[in-house]
Amino acid sequence: MRLKYFELYKRLKLLNFCKDVFALLIILALITLVSIRPLSSGSKLNFNDDFFQYAGRHESVRKSLLEYYTFPLRAFWFGGGYPTIGDPEDPTFNPLTIITLIFGSVMGLKLIPFIAILIGGISAYLFAKYILNYTGWGALFTGIMFGLNLLYLYEYKMEIQMRYILLFFHCVCFL
């Protein structure tokens, strides 16, 4: 008798796991569908001052690390060579700079917000489901709405990445 309850518990747990995986795949598919256009443009530039500034900073880090094997201590293209390490917006020690090292500065600056939005939507689903105890549909709606929020998509279009740190709040709360 006890073995039957244990088997039933295992089956219910597997069913809940499959529902979670399916919901996470829906969130992933919707966010990816919305982000296809900026990601498929490849290395096309966004003619925005903020994008040029962040691209210059990331390219400075990328050029210093890959060509000179050192951290950038002075700006290559800004202000006649001011020290960049002390600048709060300097991406030298940002862990997401690895993406720009691998994919290049332009594509990296397009992938960083996409990954942040994706992590934010998935984390919002998990946070709503397991911490706030929403139902499956409510948590799915929360994840979709957080991932497809027009404010973040507008900023994704504008390529402003500094505000994407807020998207990781739900991930930190869930952990």
Image: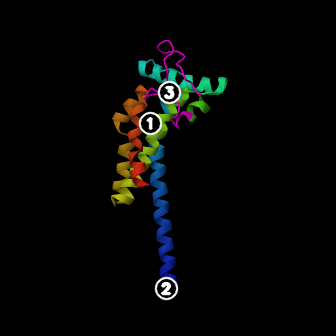
Q: Earlier in the sequence, mark 1 or mark 3?
A: 1
- Give the residue at x 51% y 20%: 56
Name the amino acid, label 2: Arg
Task: Look at the picture and state if 124 lies above or below 6.
Answer: above
Name the residue that disc number 1 marks: 34
State the residue lying farthest toward the top: 80
Circle 2 crowding by C-alpha within 10 Å: few under 14, some 14–19, many from 20 = few
- Give the residue at x 37% y 35%: 152
Q: Secondary structure at mark 1?
A: helix
In reply to whether residue 95 is colored magenta, the answer given is: yes
What secondary structure is the magenta-colored segment mainly?
loop
| Residue 14 in sight in this render | yes
Name the residue that disc number 3 marks: 85
Name the amino acid, label 1: Val
Pinpoint residue 15: horizontal percent, then vertical percent: 48, 66
Do the residues under discs 1 and 2 have CB atoms within 8 angstroms? no
- Give the residue at x 41% y 38%: 165
Pinpoint residue 132: horizontal percent, then vertical percent: 33, 58
Which mark is on residue 2? 2
Q: What is the magenta range?
A: 71-97
Do the residues under discs 3 and 2 have CB atoms within 8 angstroms? no
Task: Look at the picture and state if 21 lies above or below 83.
Answer: below
Q: Earlier in the sequence, mark 3 or mark 2?
A: 2
